[in-house]
Image (cartoon, grey):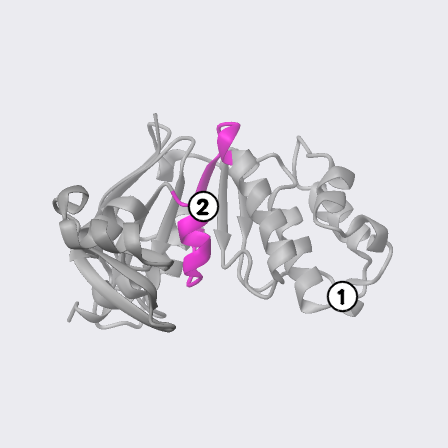
Amino acid sequence: MKAFSVEKLHYKYPNSKEDTIKGISFDIKEGEIFGLLGPSGAGKSTTQKILIKLLEGYSGNIQYFGKDLKAIGNSFYEEVGVGFEMPVHFSKMTALENMKFFSGFYKKIANVQELMERVGLWEHRNVRVGNYSKGMKVRLNFVRAMLNNPRVLFIDEVTNGLDPKNARIVKDIISEYRNQGGTVFLSTHLMNDVEQLCDRIAFCVNGNLYDVSTPRDLKLKYGKREVKIEYKEEKETASAVFPLEGIGMNDAFQNILKSKEIETIHSGETSMEDIFIIVTGGVQ
């Protein structure tokens, strides 16, 4: 089933001369992590705000689990969790007081203690949020997004400001959520998050969408079908590049493998950073 089906979506801000969103179409499948990438000002945040019903006045059609998004009332907010890039909390209240306050908006609530323990904040639950570090605020923001056991989770730069250990914890929770049937709409500039989390991605550039695909297929599309091998040659590091086609029958490649001390072997796989630059930089 499709969590969201978007067809020919247009949106123009009241004081703008042209559309910010220019007729984009895409879908988000239930139980997948869908990443929307692109440079600043490309329309990512606008698209997200439309999908979470913060912006109205769009044209086109948006279906949410088969229902017209415009026709769905406040029950919609019981089913979605949202984590904006900038944490939103009451700084003079403790972390636990914040979570209890936000919990009051929902009929069903997740296990707050369990979530805060997972992200390493339970022992700091009685500390005022104003005294939290940036990373602690980011983690608390993620807990708030998960408060209502959402059916669909919208997250923006979810690991920005986190050290590798805490970023891994958050990404593990997101993966577990997806594996249990949850749907995720992820907006980020962090390509490691994209590679480790996303099932499919799309690039938003100047209000249009490009290359809606899986990270793997994009790497195959933009990568070079070659293998680079580094090896020891008279105590120095030498290298050679071979075409991937017929690599198993390539005598020169096989000879290096058999006779040299191998240091590294790399395929011509293109990084997500390179793909981002190629796609967003090649669009006028």
Q: Which residue is mark 2?
A: 197
Kindly identify which numbered label has been placed on residue 132. Answer: 1
Residue 12 visible (yes or no): no
Give how far across and how far down residue 3 sits, in percent.
38, 33
The stretch of residues the image draws in magenta is: 178-198
Question: Is residue 251 or residue 26 the one in the foreground?
Answer: 251
Determine which quarter of the picture holds residue 40: bottom left
Q: Is residue 75 left or right of residue 148?
A: left
Q: Name the residue located 80 percent from the left edge and 65 percent from the top edge.
A: 92
Residue type at mark 1? Answer: Tyr
Spot the residue most to the top: 1
The residue lying at 29 percent from left, 70 percent from top is 238
For residue 77, side relative to residue 21 (left or right)? right
Quadrant housing the N terminus? top left
Relative depth, front residue between 52 and 228: 228
How much space separates mark 2 and mark 1, taking CA atoms?
27 Å
Is 182 part of what is drawn in magenta?
A: yes
Q: Is residue 179 above or below residue 267?
A: above
Q: Is residue 107 visible?
A: yes
Dot 1: element: loop
Give the secondary structure at mark 2: helix
